[in-house]
Amino acid sequence: MLENRINKEILKEKLNNEVFNRQTLSFYKYFDIEQPTQFRDQLYKVLDKLNCFGRIYVAHEGVNAQMSVPENNVTLFLAELYSFDKELNNLPIKYAIEDDGKSFYKLTIKVRPKIVADGLEHNSYDLSKVGEHMSALDFHAAINDPNTVVVDMRNHYESEIGRFENAYCPDADTFREAIVDVVEKFGQEKDKRFLLYCTGGIRCEKASSYLIHHGFDNVAQLHGGIIEYAQQIKKLGINSKFYGKNFVFDQRLGERVDGQVISQCHQCGKPADTHTNCANDDCHLLFIQCEACKVQYDGCCGESCKSIIQLPLADRKKLRAENFDKYAASKIFKSRLRPQLAHKKMVNGAK
């Protein structure tokens, strides 16, 4: 399989030494791909020659990409992408809100069962039936309608650092948990209008389809997601109804939208909205950490992991073999640092 196997530290150093700028962008499309592996290999060759980095998922149901492209190659990249497959011709591209070009350090393209994992049976919804695509301005205007329910279709660690005014944010670890939660929560209010949003729109395609399948007749979704909304309101000089930071799935882990910090450090409780992965690789828990706690805990989620990373490598390997389950990230996440915010309550503005 075509892939970059150079050590990541070497790749990161090379990225930091680049003398040109990069642009972070994303795109997705649901369409039938008969041979995902062949599609993946051909796409890798096209993007690699343009020095593109990023993470791309390819499946029978379509393609989902987050990328870093050299600025001087963006025009050529778009031409190559649009001509690669007729389904990608004039595909909408979403550009990062905040961008230093350091979002990815290599190109990774993987074939997956689905481009958005939903944990659902393939025929449990019909992707040909999706909600109305609302523009950023229409969505902005509709948020305060009393007959409207605004729903965040992201995971709780995303909505914790940023969310729309009046949004219902499922306390969910996975996309599947989120969509099931919404159906159960609002099963007796299907006559209302539901406005869905996510990072770039891809999860809302499936979520709106799933809700429609379960009898929600009036479903709409924010076209282009939070990324497009932030771009449009900034361009028009409108006060944002999205408060805080937009979580992104690359090295940046977030983009500021309105400048507010609405979340807290998971260790000391002070205002903070910077996610980090625990420096103990056997934990690697994703959590919010302020700068003071980062110094105090050496980038770890607690004293236990801090003590582990201070051990000699041989001792760490031995400990890993003997106590792997004890330090599994999923267990730590559930028991220690899961945010305690009341995500299941309606959020009436920034707190």
Image: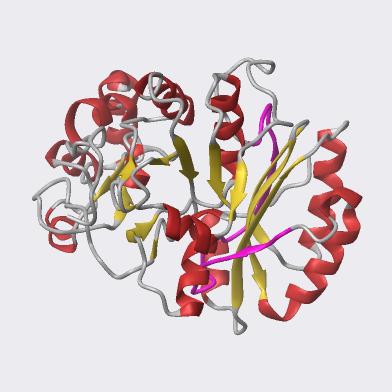
> Relative to residue 25, is residue 181 drawn left or right?
left
Residue 158 in picture, x, y percent from top left: 37, 46
Residue 247 in picture, x, y percent from top left: 41, 53
The residue at the point 73 percent across, 67 percent down is: 51
Residue 146 in picture, x, y percent from top left: 33, 44
Q: Is residue 343 above or below residue 253?
A: above
> Relative to residue 316, is residue 335 drawn left or right?
left
Answer whether residue 248 is visible to the viewer in this image: yes
Q: Which residues are magenta?
A: 92-115
Q: Is residue 113 magenta?
A: yes
> Relative to residue 279, is residue 342 drawn left or right?
left
Q: Nearer the viewer, residue 273 or 132?
A: 132
Q: Nearer the viewer, residue 103 or 177?
A: 177
Q: Is residue 234 above or below residue 243?
A: below
Q: Quadrant of the C terminus?
A: bottom left
Q: Main secondary structure of the magenta part?
A: loop
Figure quadrant of residue 252: bottom left
Q: Nearer the viewer, residue 292 or 132?
A: 132
Q: Is residue 65 magenta?
A: no
Figure quadrant of residue 81: bottom right
The residue at the point 53 percent across, 66 percent down is: 96
Q: Residue furthest bottom?
A: 19
The residue at the point 31 percent across, 53 percent down is: 165
Answer whether residue 5 is visible to the viewer in this image: no
